[in-house]
Amino acid sequence: MNVSPVRPRGLSILITASAVLAVMFISAASCEQSWQPTAQPARSPQAPSAMTEVRFMTLDPGHFHAGLVQKEMYQSASRTVHVYAPLGTDLTEHLNRIAGFNTRKENPTSWELEVHAGPDFLGRMLREKPGNVVVLSGRNRGKIDRIKASVEAGLNVLSDKPWIIEPADFPKLESALNRAEQAGLVAYDIMTERYEITTILQRELINDQGVFGTQVPGTEQDPGVFIESVHHLLKMVAGMPNRRPAWFFDIAQQGEGLPDVGTHLVDLVPWILFPEQGIEYRKDVKVLSAKRWPTVLSRTDFQKVTGVGEYPGDLAPYLKGDKLDYYCNTLVSYILRNVYVKLNILWNYEPPPGGGDTHYAAFRGTKSRVEIRQGKEEQYRPELYVLPGVPSERDEVLSALRRKIGLLQARFPGVAVDDRGRQIVITIPDKYRVGHEAHFGEVTNHFLSYLKNPKSIPAWEKPNMLAKYYVTTKGLELSRSGASATN
């Protein structure tokens, strides 16, 4: 690759899949300069115009989820994506992930990347604006400031969770959503769990009175809804070990368990219980209690998952001798309308042999209990169960279930009922089990449909997003104080 230096400003370069690995050899000192490849003509800035095509700009891709948005091509999107980021390993790993998608044997993508690397990546993106959609996934602290700045610059936003990790940032979230709504922009939270087939079917069954009855309110000790999510720090992603950046373990950057991955669980509860209904966090939600505790890592554990031999200085507040207290586990209880909900968010170091991340979700109805389980018995694959509550009503529930599954054949041909006595299993063909990574494409396609007509965004999305982040940040606040809510 022939390059010629110009005035210091930051690094700019057009990269195709075959050239991505070359970026790995650009020294950190290059970030003090700006480069243009002699083999590529300079591109003129695009003047603002009506959206005839979607033009993605990826901002500081510090998490592999940013890459998963580009795991497939989109008919309405330009193949050229502008990447604005500081020069470092987060950027090079992102570039190589996209290169992997472009060079895979089955259904390869054809993305072209224009990379703008330098310390003023956010300011430069907002000045140049070569695209109309900002994609964010990475460091969570300050993410809402980047979202807010993007919206105020007239840009649409597709952002990975969480948008906020601290209670003090809640007003910024409200402001950003209000500004987007007023400007006719789309600011969308990537909620992939809504696209998991077992969750979709669980929602359908819970909202069928013949199968489920009505939701049991429960109590704080015995809630009507209980969901537990178990993640692992050391894991495989896209067939490769997922090295986490050292900053991932800084809870001031990444957030704790509830404000981070717990966002998905909080999102699912109203989505399942109250479809198409808006939740008013000021009157419909009361967070009761929460507690937090760490997963303890040894120096060897830390080195294995990050590739970094020494703890960075930012982690000093969480060190006890040679051990790192990573506060990533949270148990929270709250009331949604009249239903008691309990969520348990857990991070273990690594999964058991043959295992992986797990999800357990139980909703108690007056006629049956509908559960998703993903344990050893299910070979760590999510399965959907219906457990009739009253023996005398079992046949009635089974008949209603068969009728409901029959109606669902139009959407999900092949889904079936397997009566196993004490419990009933909903069998799901493998074609619907597309996996977590594929859900990013599904979310993105949904987002693109909203871009065509921003007024088509459901009215409940905005209030439910506020309610979701109210639960995560209020729960965090209570977990830190060790107190229960008094109002």
Image (cartoon, rainbow, N blue to C red):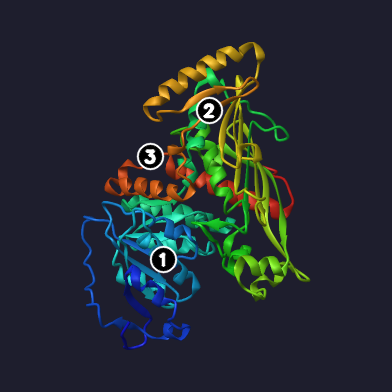
Indicate which disc, 2 or 1, sits on the residue closer to the N terminus.
1
Is 170 rendered above or below residue 115? Answer: above
Tag 1: amino acid: Leu
> Disc 2 to disc 1, how far (Cα)?
41 Å
Q: Where residue 362 sits in the image (x, y, percent)?
A: 62, 33
Relative to the observer, which residue lies in front, 147 or 229?
229
Residue 355: percent from left, percent from top: 62, 48
On the rendered structure, is 177 left or right of 389?
left
Tell me the residue that label 3 is attached to: 458
- What numbered label is drawn on residue 59? 1
Specify the quadrant of the image occupied by residue 4: bottom left
- Type of the residue with mark 2: Ile
Q: Amino acid at mark 3?
A: Pro
Which structural element holds mark 2? strand
Q: Secondary structure at mark 1?
A: strand
How crowded is the residue under tag 1: few (<14 C-alpha within 10 Å), some, or many (20+)? Answer: many
Mark closer to the chain start, 3 or 1: 1
Q: Nearer the viewer, mark 2 or mark 1?
A: 2
Q: Kindly give the residue lying farthest to the front in the view shown.
A: 105
Q: Which mark is residue 426?
A: 2
Asked if the residues shown at circle 2 and circle 1 are in contact, with their CB atoms under 8 angstroms apart, the answer is: no
Res 265 → quadrant? top right
Q: Residues within 10 Å of mark 2 (few under 14, many from 20)?
A: many
- Would you place residue 166 above or below residue 227 in this image? below
Residue 144 can be seen in this image: yes
